[in-house]
Amino acid sequence: MIICKSPAEIEKLRRSGQVVRQVLLETKDRVRPGETTLELERFVEKRLRELGAKPASKGYRGYPWCLCTSVNNEIVHGMPSNRRLREGDIIGLDLGVIVDGYYGDSALTVPVGKISPQAEKLIRVTAESLELGIQQARYGNRLGDISFAVQQHVERNGFSVVREMVGHGIGREYHEEPQVPNFGRPGHGPVLKEGMVFTIEPMVNVGDYAMRILDDQWTAVTVDGSLSAHFEHTIAVTRNGPEVLSRLPVASGAAKTA
Ligand code: MF3
Ligand code: CO
């Protein structure tokens, strides 16, 4: 069952969305060659404490950390460690929070120093596919319209979308119905209604979409070793169109947001 949220609940989810994005952007600014992924985790832990937010991932199905740090061929759920980031790497940062009982979830992928043109294109196309998916999150549309928009943009650019991991409803639980695949057919799936809140989170590989999990039981990697990128926002379907709950307003330039 898809739980539609009241305006009061959306207000709470907005707060969670703003907190998760704020901390994620602060963390992104700390990504540089020589930094360890564990240092990023420690920073997140401290910021969440300061903001009075709880980490959503820590303890979720036994996941030990607040942050997921997925480097290069790691698709998602890479675990913080003493590994040092190197110039030319790309890193996906994925964070979930709980504020006042409501969840927020967001992710982005960033370069470590200077990266290859192909890695740059991967990051750009993945971010664009998320934006195209968001534009389809309007009441009256169907879920497949979102999935199709993401998939089409990715594949037109020669990349592939991961099949095993999907976006998800979110609210008083981290993962609710519906599932939000990054591939599908327009005009198919549940009709979108006012008050639905879910994540859209394309995971995009340079090579084949095949994925496997490492022996640590968490890290999802590309089977062919190719690079992978991940972006995620939490979105509410409103009468005025999609509202990106995890997007921060930017001070200068009315249309620009982070
Ligand atoms: N934030 C992830 C998502 O997009 C969930 C991470 S799984 C966890 O749904 F175990 F790390 F929490
Ligand atoms: Co998510």
Image (tube, rainbow, N blue to C red):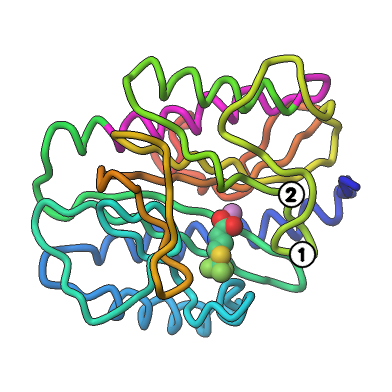
* Position above or below: 98 against 246: below
User: Residue 184 appears at what percent x and percent y?
Assistant: 63, 24
Residue 76 at x, y percent in the picture: 43, 56
- Percent from the top left, x then y, of residue 137? 69, 28
Q: Can you see residue 105?
A: no
Q: Residue at x 16, y 73 (%)?
A: 84
User: Which residue sits at x=13%, y=32%?
Assistant: 117
Q: Which residue is mark 1?
A: 173
Residue drawn where x is 66% and y is 42% of the image: 235
- Within 10 angstroms of label 1, few (less than 14), some, or many (20 or more) residues? some
Q: Is residue 215 above or below residue 238?
A: below
> CA gap, disc 1 to disc 2?
8 Å
The vertical placement of 242 against 248, above or below, is above
> Residue 183's image quarter?
top right
Left/right of residue 234 with respect to residue 252 in the rendered view: right
SS for dot 1: loop
Label 2 Cα crowd, 10 Å radius (few <14 / some 14-19 / many 20+):
many
Q: Which residue is mark 2?
A: 169
Q: Secondary structure at mark 2?
A: strand
Amino acid carrying label 1: it is Glu
* Picture disc at residue 154: none
Q: Is residue 180 left or right of residue 91?
A: right
Q: Which residues are magenta?
A: 122-142
In the rendered image, which quarter contains the C terminus? top left
Say if the magenta span includes residue 140: yes
Q: Are marks 1 and 2 in contact (CB under 8 Å)?
A: yes
Q: Quadrant of ligand 2?
A: bottom right
**Residue 86 within the segment the image draws in magenta:** no
* Front residue (pair 57, 247): 57
Secondary structure predominantly adopted by residues drawn in magenta:
helix
Amino acid beneath label 2 = Gly
